[in-house]
Amino acid sequence: MGSTPLCGTSTPIMSSVTSRAAGAIVGSFIADAACLPVHWMYDQDELAAAVSKYPTPEFIPEPAGPFYRLPTGKNSAYGDHLFALLKSVVDSNGFDREAYQKGLKAMFGPGSAYDYERSGRPVLGPWLPGTMKKFLANYEAGKENTGDTGSSDCDGVDNTVIMAALYGGTPELMSKVEDMVKVVQNNPLCLKYSTAAAKLLESYIVNGADPSALEKIKPSVEAEVAQGIEKVLGDKNKPHNQASKEFGYACSLPGNFLSALHCLANADAQKFTESVRPTLLAGGDNCSRAIFIGGCLGAQLGLEGLPLDLLSKVERGSEVKALAEKLVAMR
């Protein structure tokens, strides 16, 4: 499916660092919302049948996820988490731990859209992930360290989009990523993959599109992550649905991250929609993978290269774009 870029032209665009930083943020929200109606569908045949009723699989009007159902255009819990971080950073003129914690409580805690009685599946409302439940319990208990020490989920990886958009290209990036990740996931596994994700995003934001970016970050990441990248590149020609299953297409690391990288390794940076689509169709925790993939694609395209038609389908699209522009003005 062809998509209309924000500037109204289909030709490749030469973007600035600021535009690429904003593009990373906006691209993440578009990709997440595009996948939401089929989030956490682990049966790839059922997913294929659900989207086959429509011309394209993005933003299908009839939600089909087995765990929860929300109106098309909304973001997943991962997107809501990303939004809480984005807003806290803009409001605080930089990353502030306490503001971030308060923002998470407002988004997910008592009195929020997530605060309702759930019974059966799918529930008719947003899904509250276990990692966020743990954060809320720790925060309510007044613990200094609010992060879940046992989480292996991909929240931290996704949220590096905001950190890289603001701090990418500066010596502060890695310390800010660590501070951010520990608020919700205080463990070495999440930190090692989140820092790797931030380095890849930083590369795209600072340098623009680069087919060899994955190869280039290998020397700067931990050995386990570098080995995973090597495996991804070695399996590049495998069908993505197959590779995604083999790496792991659930919420947890490292599989979630490696599956996202396989999608990126085969992406055409000039074709946002077509490059996100394989992870949507692979199923499983496609929303979380799409956030990171959308961020990396947006960082290569720049804000003006993102699809206007898809942004208009995101319920909070205009607000996200405005916040992204405010954030990158702080660089």
Image (cartoon, grey):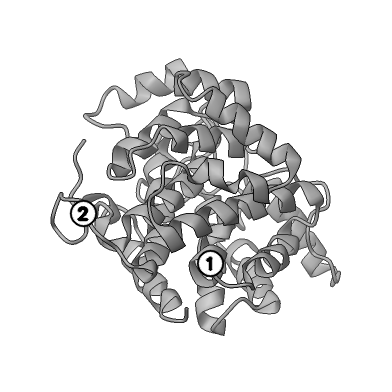
Q: 96 or 105, which lies in front?
A: 96
In the picture, the quarter occupied by the N terminus is: top left
Q: In the image, is 114 to the left or to the right of 19?
A: right
Q: Position of residue 224 (x, y in %)?
A: 74, 38
Q: Mark 2 belongs to which amino acid?
A: Pro
Which of label 2 and label 1 is nearer to you? 1
Q: Residue furthest left?
A: 9
Task: Specify which label sits upstream in the sequence, 2 or 1.
Answer: 2
Q: Residue at x 75, y 59 (%)?
A: 135
Few, some or many C-alpha atoms within 10 Å of disc 1 (few <14, some 14-19, many ≥20)? Answer: many
**Residue 47, horizontal then vertical, whole percent:** 42, 23
Q: Nearer the viewer, residue 312 or 269?
A: 269
Q: Quadrant of residue 171?
A: bottom right
Which residue position holds label 2?
5
- The disc placed on residue 168 is 1
Q: Is residue 214 above or below residue 240?
A: below
At label 1, the amino acid type is Gly
* Label 2 residue SS: loop
Front-lying residue, 235 or 141: 235
Asked whether the viewer can see residue 220, the reply is yes
Q: Secondary structure at mark 1?
A: loop
Q: In this rendering, would 188 be left or right of 322?
A: right
In the shown orientation, is residue 206 left or right of residue 268?
Answer: right
Task: Please identify the residue farthest to the top as the structure is shown.
Answer: 45
- Residue at x 51%, y 73% (from the top left corner): 87
Residue name at image x 65 percent, y 78 percent: 96
Question: Can you tell which mark lies on residue 110?
Answer: none
The percent position of residue 273, horizontal first and vertical second, equals: 30, 41
Could one spot residue 253 in this view of the protein? no
